[in-house]
Image: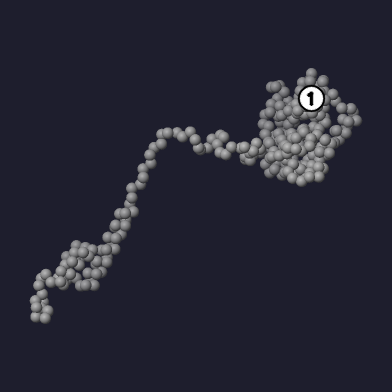
Amino acid sequence: MEFMGMKESPHSSSSLFDADFAFTSPISRKDRAGGDNLSAQETLAAAKKNYGSRHKRLKLKKSRRAKQEKLPLTVKFKHGGKRKGAGRPNVSGLRAHVARETLTGKHPLHVTFKICEGMPNLRRKKFFQAFRKSVLKAQKKGLALLHFSILSNHVHMIVEVADNRALHLGLQSLNTAFAKRVNFILSRTGAVLRERFHMRVLKTPIEYFTTLRYVLTNAEKHGAVKNEMDLFSSAVMFGAFEILIGERAAKKIRWPSTEVFKKAVDFIEPLLTKPGTWLARLGWVRGFAVV
């Protein structure tokens, strides 16, 4: 080809440009085999097509990274994990808020609640009346009281409930009503109960027998009474002390006068409910044979 009377050499700029473009552009061997037969548009389209596929291949190749292998751990660590006593230590001295055991209503319960420090002695007539009114109110929520004992700073109870909800509603009603009445008597405000109540499910005759003996004789253990009937408990309603504490110990107990005894029975009898579980009715006697 001639340009202005000059022949174009085979190594001119245009031929070099075509050669460089053919070498540097990502055109496949099949498209490059056509050589000069490809037009400029076809060459550009082939270049874009092959560039895109090559770009995808490079991207896919980069994404396929080797996964890190897991090394087998043969050493058993002695710290961490789920175990007894794990977690933040309880420095408050109060009862932990752990989940309660699921109740089915087949077993009686031993329940204890304590009052705050600095409160007066609960073994007074006015506090006993406050406890009586609170129990009568809690009975409407499903709480069945079998036996109880009022001490200076805590109260023991043996109760029966249908399920966890009845226990929650009954004790919530009892504790709230009792706290309000105590604050009204003392002309004060604030908390009365020290912590959440303690609960233990009594499942065997020996458990119920030992718990019943512990509750009805707890005042003597704390020195509140000595060899006499505790009138701040349901002991006057229990007629088998010879079985509970033995004949020799039962003969040493000084019973109140007939007039005082009748008043105590009339005062305490509405608080107690007839036991519905076999263990509280008859089964506890078997525990006497074991003890």
Q: Seen in the image, is 87 located left or right of residue 16?
A: right
Give the vertical position of 142 relative to 44 (above or below).
above
Up the image or down, 256 lies above or below 129; here it is: above
Quadrant location of the N terminus in the rendered image? bottom left
Query: In the shown orientation, is residue 271 left or right of residue 194?
Result: right
Q: In the current view of this chain or complex, which residue is farthest to the right?
A: 259
Residue 51 lies in quadrant: bottom left
> Residue 290 falls in which quadrant of the image?
top right
- Going 90% across and 30% down the picture, which residue do you hit? 259
Q: Which residue occupies 24% across, 69% down?
A: 44
Where's residue 243, x and y in %? 76, 23
Q: Residue at x 59, y 37 (%)?
A: 89
Question: Which colour assignment does the render follow?
Answer: one colour
Q: Nearer the viewer, residue 130 or 240?
A: 130
Q: Quadrant of residue 14?
A: bottom left
Q: Residue 163, can we see it?
A: no
Residue 185: percent from left, percent from top: 82, 43
76 and 236: which is toward the camera: 76
Which residue bears the numbered disc 1?
241
Pick out the residue farthest to the front: 118
> Where's residue 134, x and y in %?
79, 42
Question: Between residues 231 and 9, which one lies in front from this camera angle?
Answer: 9
